[in-house]
Amino acid sequence: MSADIAAPRSQRLDPKYVRARKSRGSFEMIAWLFMRLSGVALIVLIFGHLFANLMLGEGITGIDFGFVAGKWADPVWMFWDLAMLWLAMLHGTNGVRTIINDYAEKPATRVWLKGILYVATIVIVVLGTLVIFTFDPCIPGSTLSVCQ
Amino acid sequence: MSKASSGTLYRGHEGMWSWVGHRVTGVVIFLFLLVHVLDTSLVRVSPGAYDAVMSTYKNPLMALGETALVAAIVFHAFNGLRLILVDFWKSGTKYHRQMLWGVLALWVITMVAFSIRHLSIAFGGH
């Protein structure tokens, strides 16, 4: 008399052992690819930002309200700073999300930390975007050339 | 080092330390980024408020902090390019150690050049 033993992995697993069930689609792969693509773009954007602001002209001693007004009078620098803001915030947020996933083990801790992270990201990105687009260099009594 | 942790390809070697360096510099840069967007947002409050906060960045002690921040950014940037080569170049995993020494060499060269310019400006020697 022979016992009937099913072949291993023949669709008789308890659902809690099926790892693919928790699949999040391609989100993690897209996040991985985004880190590499945004990373390359950020090297150009941030090195350009540091070179223009700290290496050229008077360097850090030349940075004041008039310096910002002069840069944002040029749409190229507005777009540069906008792209830098969005890409750096998304790149950094995804990096910190990875770190939270690695070190926070309790589900409630992970939810709270990521919640705080996402709220901070949205606040900073919205604030920065509004500042770039609503910036007005012409305060009353301004001596800046663009306001004459 | 405990016996259990010796003899692996990863732990305690170039792969692990570059990963630690990438994480630490990444977190430092992200925290500064949050502060930097907030300080720049002061241009929307008043020119005086913005200029007052910018003057704190011109303190020589802060210039040392800025140099450390740029050192973190430059390491993260060059090591990030190394990670991309490890992922996409077919010989990337074979030469990841040599590439780390290349990253560190480029990092030193870049930081020497940056520090000379930035610190001479910040310390008033230009």
Image (spheres, grey):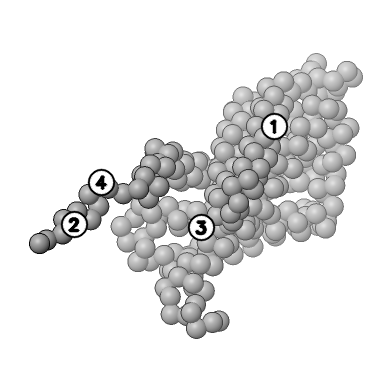
Q: Which residue is drawn at 61% across and 39% down?
A: A89
Identify the chain of the residue marked 2, using the numbered disc in the image.
Answer: A
**Residue for point 47% across, 67% down:** B15
Residue under pointer 2: A5
Quarter of the image holding residue B47?
top right
Q: Distance between the residues labelled 2 and 4?
A: 13 Å
Cα separation, mark 3 vs mark 4, equals: 44 Å
Q: Could you tell whether A5 is left or right of B13 in the image?
A: left
User: Looking at the picture, do discs 3 and 2 lie on one chain?
Assistant: no
Residue sticking out furthest to the left: A1
Which is closer to the viewer, label 3 or label 2?
Answer: 2
Question: What is the quadrant of the N terminus of chain B in the image?
Answer: bottom right
Q: Who is closer to the viewer here, A22 or B113?
A: A22
SS of the residue at dot 1?
Answer: helix
Q: Which residue lies furthest to the bottom in this view?
A: B3
* Residue annotated with mark 3: B79
Nearer the N terminus, badge 2 or badge 4?
A: 2
Q: Would you say A81 lies left or right of B119 here?
A: left
Is circle 3 on the same chain as circle 1? no
Foreground of the two, A107 or B17 = A107
The x, y position of residue B71, in whole percent, is 64, 58
Residue that appears at 81% across and 48% down: B57
| Label 1, label 2: how far apart the Cα atoms are | 59 Å
Task: Answer whether labels 3 and 2 touch (C-beta < 8 Å).
Answer: no
Amino acid type, mark 4: Gln
Q: Answer few, some or many: residues within 10 Å of disc 4's Cα (few below 14, many 20 plus, some between 14 and 19).
A: few
Residue tagged by mark 4? A11
